[in-house]
Amino acid sequence: MFYPRTTTVHDEECGIQTRHMTLRGEPFGYVASCSGKECTAMLAMICAVTAGSAVVSGSIVVVGNVVYWVERQSKCGPAIWISRL
């Protein structure tokens, strides 16, 4: 299973707290002994759920990082460039 994780760090350059999202993965579980159609169906379900969680969580991470980037730019983006001149 995949899930988004947010970390917060202090940005020395801007003097603010910034956030960043990453995609984390956890093992889905252990498949005990199985055979035939039961095993095939179980593996197909596990693959579908894992792929679905990767797509949804990955989309959340991308959108979240864009929002955090825009937030950082609005708080200190232009000020940094002006102070460097």
Image (cartoon, helix red, strand yellow):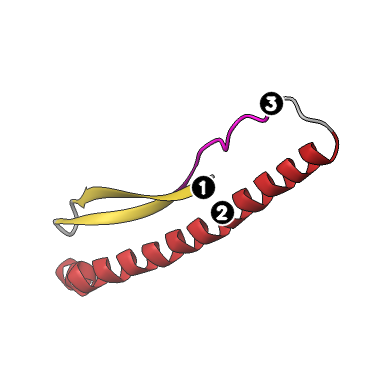
Rendered position, 25 above or below 76: above
Mark 3 element type = loop
Res 85 visible: no
Which residue bears the numbered disc 3?
32
**How far is disc 2 from disc 3 in space, using C-alphas?**
24 Å
> How dense is the environment of label 1, judged by Cα within 10 Å: few (below 14), some, or many (20 and up)?
many
Reply yes or no: does residue 69 show up in magenta: no
> How dense is the environment of label 3, judged by Cα within 10 Å: few (below 14), some, or many (20 and up)?
few
Mark 2 element type = helix
**How far is disc 3 from disc 1 in space, using C-alphas?**
22 Å
Instruction: Name the outermost residue toward the right.
Output: 36
Mark 1 element type = strand
On-image quarter of the C terminus: bottom left
- Which tag, 2 or 3, sits closer to the chain's start? 3
Say which residue appears at 67% left-offset and 30% top-offset. 31
Reply yes or no: does residue 27 show up in magenta: yes
Rendered position, 81 above or below 22: below
Which residue bears the numbered disc 1?
2
Amino acid under disc 3 = Ala
Q: Position of residue 28 (x, y in %)?
A: 57, 38
Residue 3 placement, left or right of 40: left
Which residue range is magenta in the image? 23-31
Amino acid under disc 2 = Ala
Say which residue appears at 49% left-offset and 63% top-offset. 59
- Which tag, 3 or 1, sits closer to the chain's start? 1
Say which residue appears at 66% left-offset and 45% top-offset. 46
- Which tag, 2 or 1, sits closer to the chain's start? 1
Mark 3 and mark 1 residues within 8 Å of each other at the beta carbon:
no
Residue 51 placement, left or right of 64: right
Say which residue appears at 24% left-offset and 48% top-offset. 9
Which residue bears the numbered disc 2?
54
Out of 56 and 31, give the one closest to the viewer. 31
